[in-house]
Image (cartoon, helix red, strand yellow):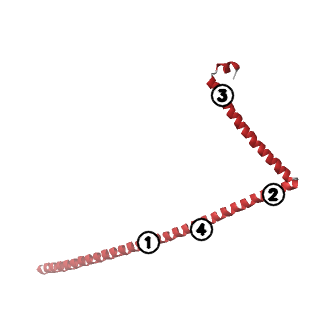
Amino acid sequence: MTDKELKRLNRRELLEMLIMQSKKIDRMQTEIDELNQKLSKRDLVISESGSIAEASIKINNVFANAQTAADQYLKNVYNLHADTEKECRILREKTEAECRGMEKQAKEQAQQYLEQTKQMIDSGVSDFKERMKEMADMLFDQEKVNEILNGDKHEKE
């Protein structure tokens, strides 16, 4: 902001700017304090380490903890996988049992339909035989009547 722009501002606007600047300074001071604390902690860690060997031992502990966490994670994944496989096996067995039941029911229905069809065919064949017998009887009787009639004709001649 230029001097000219600053001169045009009224008291209220100037006070607001001062308050904003004061808040910004407070935030920055807090941030500086935090950074100083982190720096002092780092200096403390470095002074505690004392040597590269001690630092590597501390790093190795971090890696060991990370390895332990990774191993635990893998164990959980394997357990979850085993649980999922068990659930899948149970569902598969249940589905197979249901399929066997449906297959058995379908076979029973097919057998019932087959029996009904056989009965209907046997009944139809029986009816057909009876009608054929009746027709044969009627034909036989008709032939006898014809013979008699034809025999009478021959006698009249």
| Residue positioned 64% across, 27% down in the render | 15
* Amino acid identity at mark 2: Asn
Q: Amino acid at mark 4?
A: Lys
Mark 2 to mark 3: distance in Å? 52 Å
Residue carrying label 2:
60
Q: Quadrant of residue 123?
A: bottom left
Query: Which residue extends farthest left?
Result: 156
Which residue has dot 3 on it?
17
Which of pointers 3 and 4 lies earlier in the amino acid sequence? 3
Amino acid at circle 3: Met
N-term mark: 2 or 3: 3
Mark 4 — residue? Answer: 86
Quarter where residue 80 is shown: bottom right
Residue depicted at 83% across the width and 57% down the height: 57
Mark 3 or mark 1: whose residue is earlier in sequence: 3
Total numbered labels placed on residues in the image: 4
Of tags 2 and 3, the one toward the viewer is 3
Residue at 61%, 66% (x, y): give it: 83
> Dot 3: few (<14), some (14–19), or many (≥20) neighbours within 10 Å?
few
| Marks 1 and 2 close (CB-CB < 8 Å) | no
Helix, strand or loop for disc 2: helix
Select label 4 or label 1 by which is in front. Answer: 4
Is label 4 in a helix, a strand or a loop? helix
Mark 4 crowd level (few <14, some 14–19, many ≥20, 10 Å Cα): few
Seen at 65% across and 65% down, the residue is: 79
Q: Position of residue 14 (x, y in %)?
A: 65, 25
